[in-house]
Amino acid sequence: MLAPAAPLGASLPLGLATGDIVLALVLVLAEVLAWLGATAEVALDHVSRSRLLDESEPEDREALGRKLESTPKLQFTAQLARYLGNATLVLALGYLVFRSEARDGQGLPFGLAVTAVLLAFALTFLVNDVLARVVAERDPERIARRSLPALVVLAFLTAPVRAPLRAALRLLFRVRLEDGPATAREEVRESLEEGEREGAFSAAEAEMIGSIIDMKSSRVEDVMTARGDMVSIAETATLDEAVKLVNEEGYSRIPVHRRDRDDIVGVLYARDLLQRWRPAGSEQGEAPTVGQLMRLAYFVPEGKLVADLMQDMKARKVHLAVVVDEHTRVAGVVTIEDLLEEIVGDIQDEYDDEEEAPAPTPEELATGSLEVEGRTPIEDVNRALDVHLPVTDDYETVGGLVFHELGKVPEAGDRLELDAVALTVLEADERTVRRLHVQKV
């Protein structure tokens, strides 16, 4: 005969009751919450924002960027999820122990129950701390991308009680919930200042360490040479023209353009050039062009983090990258030397003119006008004349401004009026503006 069905709420087969099922569900949900918080917290601390955006679908990047702007809030939410999940696990497992004792022998023996709970605690620690950290550190971009939607929902749900919960967690667990990487950097800077005062290291060493910390947030657009100021050579140029340019500029790597500087197609290495170049009059076959010697260019977005780019350039073994904006237009170039200068300051090599570096301050003239070099920063001119010449992503120097506005290679005598300022080219060559006269009109 078939056994009669168990009444609702009565013990189920194998000793399972409705309360047991609910408790099991609570344990599972608590573990999911703790795992989500643990992995997301580690991932957000190690994730590369630029790499995460690069690997995302184009239509998802804007929404993803907005979410990443709230990283400190999401990091706290992840910490909150981890603590709440672990706390729920502790309470649920503790309940199992007391219930086992209260059942008067119907459940597990008390000693065995305590042993089971201790083993569960150990397993929880291994899973939610050790294993979660290993998984998140291995691929932080993937973990961050998958956990962000859930974190955003949790952040919304906990918004009304986030502040009191934060205070309670600090009190109960004796931990400091960080506001994010910015807070950590400020604490390191405070330690640097204290160490410098106590003589642990010099001011130069403290400045270098501070620069390394800043690289965590510095972006390529902050250190690159803007498009209006970069040097490039035509794909169809002869090797004689290339040798002349290398001698004049002193660069060992030069971007190669097809139509203009907005159409970079490669990079010419001086070493490759000198291996193939032959002086005029020497016996040689058909002379190659620059386009035949150039190597593929490495393109990077202007929003890429400097620290990430340094690692990528090291892995790729390249020393120059072409920077593009969000519309894939050329924004400038950046070299490994530019990145290193973010740490150690300006690096002078044998080709740098010490009298010209850094860019000179404009010479003030009695007439209220200025005579400046083409590479003078526009902001210096604006301050000296109290004017408002524009500074954009395309150019940062006066020469770059003139080059951009004229739409051609400037020549001596060319004149441009912009925002009540007259700019006259005094000296120029086939590539750059050397000196200009600037006057308010």
Image (cartoon, grey):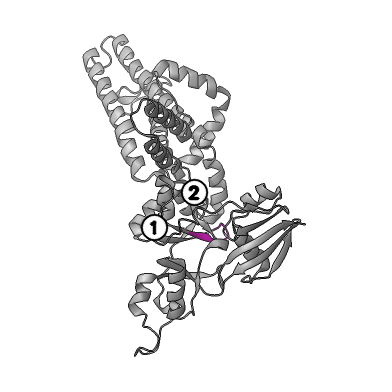
Give the residue number, with chain letter if any, for mark 1: 349
Which span of residues is magenta-colored?
A: 325-333
Q: Amino acid at mark 1?
A: Asp
Percent from the top left, x then y, of residue 139?
Answer: 36, 46
Q: Is residue 45 above or below residue 118?
A: below
| Left or right of 416 in this view: 178 | left
Q: Residues within 10 Å of mark 1 (few under 14, many from 20)?
A: few
In-image side of 421 versus 412 (left or right): right
Label 1 sits on a secondary structure element that is loop
Comparing 20 with 420, the one in front is 420
Q: Which residue is mark 2?
A: 219
Q: Nearer the viewer, residue 150 or 231?
A: 231
Secondary structure beneath label 2? loop
Q: Position of residue 123 (x, y in %)?
A: 27, 29
> Depth check: 293 or 358 in front?
358
Q: Is residue 329 visible?
A: no
